[in-house]
Amino acid sequence: MTTKYGILGALVGAALFAAPVQAESIKIGFNVPLTGFAAADGLSAKNGAELALEQINSAGGINGDLLELVVYDDQASPKEAVPIAQKMIEKDNVVAAISGSYSGSTRAAAGIFQESGVPYISAYAIHPDITRAGNNVFRTSFVGEVQGRAGAKLIGETLKLKNVAIVTLKNDFGQSLAAGFKEAADTFGLEIIAEYEYSIKDRQFGPIVSKLRADKPEVIYASGYFFTAGPLVSQLRSGGIKVPVIGQEGYDSQKFIDIAGAASEGTIITTSLDRDSSSAETQDFIASFEKKSGQKADMVAASAHTAMKVLGAALQAAGSTDRKAIRDAIAATKLTASTGEISFNDLGEVQKSVQVQIVKDGQWRHHSTIDDPELLAPPSN
C-alpha cells in the first residue's frame, strides 16, 4: 500500500530531478579606476563593459554559462594594479581579464597576467610596452605612436597646415603620442616651432598660453585628458589664441565640452568612436549605452564594450574556459565592433582606421576618417 509519505517523497524527488540546472558563471576580471583623478573615465569604461556583458548574457551566455564581471578599483595606479591582478588570478580564479584603466596601471598588471598565463585585453591604454609583456596580452585600441602619426597626417594633409606647436602631457599617454607625431612630422611637411610640457595635476596654463601667443603657430597639437584639455583649451581661447587645437582620444568625452564650454567649438581629435557612423554595431552601442547610463557615449565606454565583445566571441569560439584555448581564440578573432573592425597581429595589436571628430554645436561630430594601412600599422614581433 502506498502511503501519503511515499507519494510525497516521490513528488519531491520528481521535483528535484525536474529542477532546472543552474548555469555556472565564467569570471572575467576588470581593473578600472573608480576613485581618484580618473574616476569619470573609469565609470564610463565600467558601464561599457557591463553593457556588453549584459548583451552576451541575455543572448544565452557562453554555451549556457553566464559571464560574471569581477571589478576592482585600481585608482589608475600601478601600485594598486599589481595586487589586484594577483587577487583576480589567485582568489577569484578569473579565466581572463580586461583593463578599463590607463597605461601606467595596465602596464603593471600586464606582466602579472602574462606570467600566470591569463589572457588580458587592454581596452584603451595606449603605451607600446603593454603588449610587449607577452603573447597573453592584447589591445583593442591604437598604440600611442599610431595615433600620433595620424595626428600629423590630419594636420599636414587634411588641414594643410605647417607650423605646429606641441603641448605634451608628461606621462605615458602624452609622451607616446608626441613620439608618434614627431616621427611622422617630416613626412607631412610639418615644422615643429615649439614644444611645452605640463603635468597631470596642472589646471592653470597661463605661462604656456603666453608663450604660444608669442610663437604664433598655425595649429596646436596638444595631448591631454578631458580634465586637463578642457581648462587648457578654455584658457587658450580666452588668451586670444584662435588657431585649431588638435587633440586625441583623451579629449573624447562630453565632459571636455562641459568644462571648456563655448571654447570647445571647433576642437578636432583623433579617436576610435565615430558618433555619425553608419555601422549598425556603432549606432546600437551608442543608443544602448546612453539608455543604460544616462550619459553620452564616449571612446572609453566604446573601447571597454569592444574588449568585452572580443572576449565573449573568443570564449564562444574556444568552447572551453581553458586559458590557453581562450588566448588562442582571442588571437584569431575577427569581429565588427562599435570601434571598428577588430583583428590582431602577432603582437596582439589591432589595426583599424582612425576616426576624426570635431566639436559642433556642443556635440562631437564626424570630421573625417584616416585610413592609411602603412601609416597606421601597429608594432609587431
Image (cartoon, grey):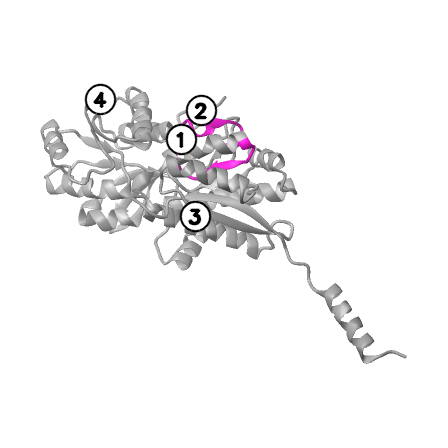
**Place of residue 152 in the rendered image (x, y in percent of width and height, measured from the top left):** 30, 28
Q: Is residue 360 shown left or right of residue 323? A: left
Exactly how many numbered labels are in the figure? 4
**Mark 1 surroundings: few (<14), some (14-19) or many (≥20) residues within 10 A:** many
The secondary structure type at the circle numbered 3 is loop
Residue under numbered circle 2? 379
**Mark 3 surroundings: few (<14), some (14-19) or many (≥20) residues within 10 A:** few
Q: Which mark is residue 191?
A: 4
Q: Is residue 205 shown left or right of residue 189? A: left
Q: Which residue appears at 70% of the width and 64% of the height? A: 19
How far apart marks 1 and 3 lie (CA) works out to 25 Å
Q: Is residue 373 shown left or right of residue 16? A: left
- Is residue 89 at all visible to an observer of this figure? yes
Q: Nearer the viewer, residue 244 or 48?
A: 48
Q: Nearer the viewer, residue 306 or 63?
A: 63
The region drawn magenta spans: 116-137
Disc nearest the viewer among 3 and 4: 4
Residue under numbered circle 1? 143
**Mark 4 surroundings: few (<14), some (14-19) or many (≥20) residues within 10 A:** some
Tag 3: amino acid = Ser
How far apart marks 3 and 4 lie (CA) works out to 36 Å
Q: Nearer the viewer, residue 65 or 377?
A: 65
Tag 4: amino acid = Glu
- Is residue 279 at all visible to an observer of this figure? no
Residue contact at pointers 1 and 2, CB within 8 angstroms: yes
**Mark 2 surroundings: few (<14), some (14-19) or many (≥20) residues within 10 A:** some
Is 151 placed above or below 6 here?
A: above
Residue under numbered circle 3? 278
Tag 1: amino acid = Val
Q: Earlier in the sequence, mark 3 or mark 4?
A: 4
